Image (cartoon, coloured by chain):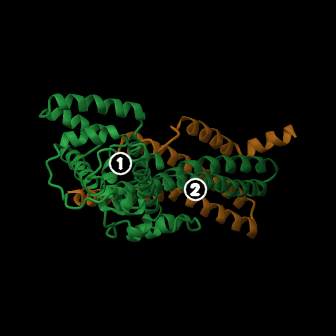
Chain colours: A green, B orange
């Protein structure tokens, strides 16, 4: 996870600063040597946080984690580097800009520009605030900067771990704050209360979660229907047939034993599949929240 | 033992034919329902075929119940009644499942509509 925040290449920082033109005005009145600042001061600076929040969107590890991107880090970096080179040669080419936005999974070019602007603005603020008078950085300054970056990563990790505290929807309370599933009951799981209107959600992640859960319930019913049939029917038929060799009462007893064992096995299999589906929904929900929190 | 099995076969011929038919239909039924769209014809066909299997179990229960009832006596009649009730449950089960899945589909449509309107 920490790789997300650490592995961001400086290359992109420079390239996007060039891309956005560096035209924003920056407060340059404050210029104090970095040595007087602690890593905590720098890490807590909104400009520093804003810089790395924006940089994360250009990090291949971020794409792999949040969007389940199947491309390798090298593929993403190489593809982006080639495009950036082309854009520098032809800055007005919209198609190239859109391709770059697609590589980093931005919704559109405006979003790409927004984040590259954020990088440029915040980088300039940090430069002027902490390193304005420095043309060459001392080893202490570099160490302070890297410690600040580690602190940022740790703070970010903590905020992700405590993400539960910032999404107060009832669906969230039920499934994320209390992820322990209640005792499984067919009628409890099939209860549609709260599902028909879907009115409790306040964000699109919640709606996606509701949709995922509803699909899981539907899949459960289908599995319940087909899997239970296999086991109940075969056990009933086998039990009844064996019992019927001896007497009609034996057939009855054999059938009932078959129904019991068949139901147990069939329902267990369907329940297990349902639990896995629900876990998948929960992971997708958390991923969606993480994604929306980072944006 | 062979004579006993043969005698039993002759007495319960219908049950054995039912079992055979059940096995044949089950083998011919495509395995999974979850792979198909609920509105597709193949999904409905699969659902119906699996439903047929449940109705076969209903027939088997009724036959066993009937055989038990023929023996006479209060206990046998009671057992036959319970078996017929169980058979009825197996008959209704496919309708019940189909109705539940239909309700979930409707709920899903509403959720997707709300999601779309939320995104707009």
Q: For mark 1, what is the residue?
A: A56
Q: Residue furthest left?
A: A92
Q: For mark 2, what is the residue?
A: A271
> Nearest the camera: B24 or A72?
A72
Is residue A220 shown left or right of residue A252?
left
User: At which x and y percent is residue A84?
Assistant: 24, 33
Above or below for A127 versus A95: below
Above or below for B12 versus A166: above
Q: Quadrant of the C terminus of chain A?
A: bottom left
Residue A192 shows in the view? no
The chain letter for the residue carrying disc 1 is A
> Nearest the camera: B17 or A116?
A116
Q: What SS does tag 1 mark?
A: helix
The chain letter for the residue carrying disc 2 is A
Disc 2 or 1, which lies upstream in sequence? 1
Residue at the image point whose x is 37% and y is 61% from the top = A36
In the picture, the disc for residue A101 is none
User: At which x and y percent is residue A111?
Assistant: 22, 48
Identify the image quadrant of residue A47. Answer: bottom left
Camera-near label (2 vs 1) is: 1
Task: Tell me the crowding category of disc 2: few under 14, some 14 to 19, or many 20 or more residues within 10 angstroms, Cα based.
Answer: some
Residue at the image point whose x is 75% and y is 42% from the top = B9
Is residue A68 shown left or right of residue A229?
left
> Nearest the camera: A115 or B63?
A115
- Asked if the residues shown at circle 2 and circle 1 are in contact, with their CB atoms under 8 angstroms apart, the answer is no
Residue at the image point whose x is 44% and y is 41% from the top = B35
Task: Tell me the crowding category of disc 1: few under 14, some 14 to 19, or many 20 or more residues within 10 angstroms, Cα based.
Answer: many
Q: What SS does tag 2 mark?
A: helix
């Amino acid at each position: 996870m920490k790789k997300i925040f650490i592995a961001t290449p400086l290359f992109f920082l420079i390239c996007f600063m060039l891309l956005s033109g560096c035209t924003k005005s920056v407060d340059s009145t404050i210029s104090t040597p970095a040595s007087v600042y602690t890593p905590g001061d720098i890490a807590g600076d909104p400009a520093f946080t804003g810089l790395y929040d924006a940089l994360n969107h250009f990090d291949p590890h971020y794409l792999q984690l949040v969007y389940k991107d199947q491309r390798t880090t090298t593929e993403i970096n190489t593809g982006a580097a080639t495009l950036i080179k082309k854009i520098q040669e032809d800055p007005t080419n919209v198609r190239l800009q859109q391709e770059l936005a697609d590589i980093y999974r931005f919704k559109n070019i405006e979003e790409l520009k927004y984040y590259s602007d954020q990088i440029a603005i915040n980088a300039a603020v940090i430069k002027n605030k902490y390193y304005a008078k420095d043309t060459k950085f001392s080893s202490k300054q570099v160490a302070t900067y890297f410690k600040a970056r580690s602190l940022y990563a740790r703070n970010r990790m903590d905020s992700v771990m405590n993400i539960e505290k910032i999404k107060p929807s009832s669906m969230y309370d039920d499934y994320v704050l209390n992820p322990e599933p209640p005792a499984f009951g067919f009628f409890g799981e099939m209860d549609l209360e709260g599902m028909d209107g879907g009115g409790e959600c306040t964000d699109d992640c919640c709606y996606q979660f509701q949709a995922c859960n509803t699909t899981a319930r539907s899949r459960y019913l289908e599995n319940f229907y087909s899997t239970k049939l296999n086991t109940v029917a075969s056990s009933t038929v086998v039990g009844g047939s064996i019992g019927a060799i001896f007497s009609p009462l034996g057939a009855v007893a054999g059938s009932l034993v078959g129904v019991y064992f068949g139901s147990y096995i069939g329902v267990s299999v369907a329940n297990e599949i349902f639990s896995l589906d629900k876990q998948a929904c929960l992971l997708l929900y958390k991923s969606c929240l993480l994604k929306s929190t980072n944006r | 033992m062979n004579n006993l099995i043969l005698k039993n076969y002759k007495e319960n011929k219908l049950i054995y034919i039912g079992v055979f038919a059940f096995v044949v239909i089950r083998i011919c039924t495509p395995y999974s329902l979850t792979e198909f769209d609920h509105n597709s014809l193949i999904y409905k066909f699969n659902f119906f075929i699996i439903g047929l299997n449940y109705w076969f179990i209903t027939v088997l229960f009724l036959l066993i119940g009937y055989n038990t009832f023929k023996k006479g006596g209060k206990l046998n009649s009671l057992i036959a009644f319970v078996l017929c009730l169980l058979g009825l449950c197996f008959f209704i089960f496919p309708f019940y499942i189909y109705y539940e899945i239909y309700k979930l589909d409707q709920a899903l449509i509403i959720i997707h509509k709300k999601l779309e309107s939320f995104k707009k």
